Image (spheres, rainbow, N blue to C red):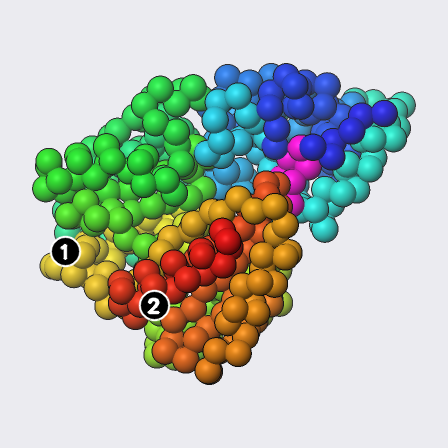
Amino acid sequence: MRDLSGIVKAYDIRGMVGDELDADVARDVGAAFTRLVGGPAVVIGYDMRESSPELAAAFAEGVTGQGIDVVHIGLASTDMLYFASGHLELPGAMFTASHNPPEYNGIKLCRSGAAPVGQDSGLSEIQELVSHGVPEFLGAQGSVTERDMLGSYAAFLRELVELEGIRPLTVVVDAGNGMGGHTVPSVLEGLPVEVVPLYFELDGTFPNHVANPLDPANLVDLQAKVRELGADAGLAFDGDADRCFVVDGNGDPVSPSAITALVASRELAREPGASIIHNLITSKAVPEIVAEQGGKPVRTRVGHSFIKQTMAETGAIFGGEHSAHYYFRDFWRADSGMLAALHVLAALGGQDGTLAELMASYSRYVASGEINSTVRDQGERMRAAAEAFRHRNGARIDELDGLTVELADGSWFNLRPSNTEPLLRLNVEAGDTATMAALRDEVLAVLRD
């Protein structure tokens, strides 16, 4: 009996290569996934990690061993795998551990049309089937064919964003030795954009810095190069290039909430009155701006499965998260950092001002960023925080996802427990730095008492 409980996460499978995730596990997961989704074929892609080709090949053996064919697209970003799943109308598997260190790898799974497979939509069934042993298939085995999807992926993205007529731009791109180094040249080819590459060499050991732009330390090289060159903007991608972070011409980070508001405004100009999804940790500027633009803001829990489900239920045209995941209805409701980057370049290149000037109207509040606190009892500390603010004049408490408290002056905070560590994650926002800092410190004092 094989136990996958340690590596089956909320949205994917992820673990230490060798100790937790090896070729045998990948083969069994491939067979179980095939039992779950059926045929006629499964599309497979993988990132630049040293372990990815072997794991992807073993997964393919599990699929073909169940009598189903495999379409292998080779090196790919996660959103390129989603494109292949949608374009080919096939379920898919992407081998990546995103921004995790080199010793990790993982499997992101989707149904045909890039529909997510998470804990509540198939992963638990796969875990159960693997634990009891996947039944042997006695018929003819499936076959493996290779297909290059990079060109069609790049062309499809460019069809979704109007880029004709933009002014020439100089943009520094930090791929972090991840899959952005594979996809960015093809996507931006032929555009009036001079790309200054940083760390485009595919290297799953991440010799320069971890491909996790959520950590400010990993933006330092990008910021320095933008300032040195006087570039118009900088883009940073995570390891599997499904998230994109932006810095302006001053080298200052642009918040993902501001990018969400910008892209939402552009999409609403194309489809007035449409619904826009935002998770509860994005800045409250997002729903404000959506409403001002005539759209319908829809608030949801954090996490791609919740975003995609709500998009399907509401027909929303776009959705954004604080973590720089951006979801597009016309991209099979899947997330694509590259598509968000194209929107930023189109908006910047379509006017004469700087990116900082362009983004000023989308950045209305001061945010703390995510702050982690190690606690013995997550539930007890969250209850303590709720009690500390419950009777505050004008306070509103919301438990859609963790604990959200909004105060009478418009400032708010959210506390969410980590699913895998004894941590509470705090996000705070207010109208000015002093108010944000005071609220942040007050909440942290309760958590760390």
* x, y percent for residue 193: 20, 42
Q: Which residue is mark 1?
A: 354
366 left or right of 250? right
**Residue drawn where x is 55% and y is 55% of the image:** 416
- Count of numbered badges drawn on the protein: 2
Vertical relation: 140 (above or below) 186 = above
User: What element does badge 1 sit on?
Assistant: loop
Between 104 and 111, the one lying in front of the other is 104
Residue lying furthest bottom: 394
* x, y percent for residue 6: 69, 32
| Spatial separation of the CA atoms under disc 2 and disc 1 | 26 Å
What's the magenta bit mostly, secondary-structure-wise? loop
Estimate how packed mark 2 is, as few (under 14), some (14 to 19) or many (20 or more) residues with alpha carbons within 10 Å: many
* x, y percent for residue 243: 42, 44
Between 363 and 370, the one lying in front of the other is 370
Tell me the tag on residue 430. Answer: 2
Vertical relation: 131 (above or below) 432 = above
Which amino acid does the dot numbered 2 rest on?
Ala
Magenta region: 7-13
236 left or right of 404? left
Which amino acid does the dot numbered 1 rest on?
Thr
User: What element does badge 2 sit on?
Assistant: strand
**Residue drawn where x is 38% and y is 76% of the image:** 410
Look at the image and say whether residue 400 sits in the magenta stretch.
no
Residue lying furthest front: 449
Determine the image quadrant of residue 235.
top left
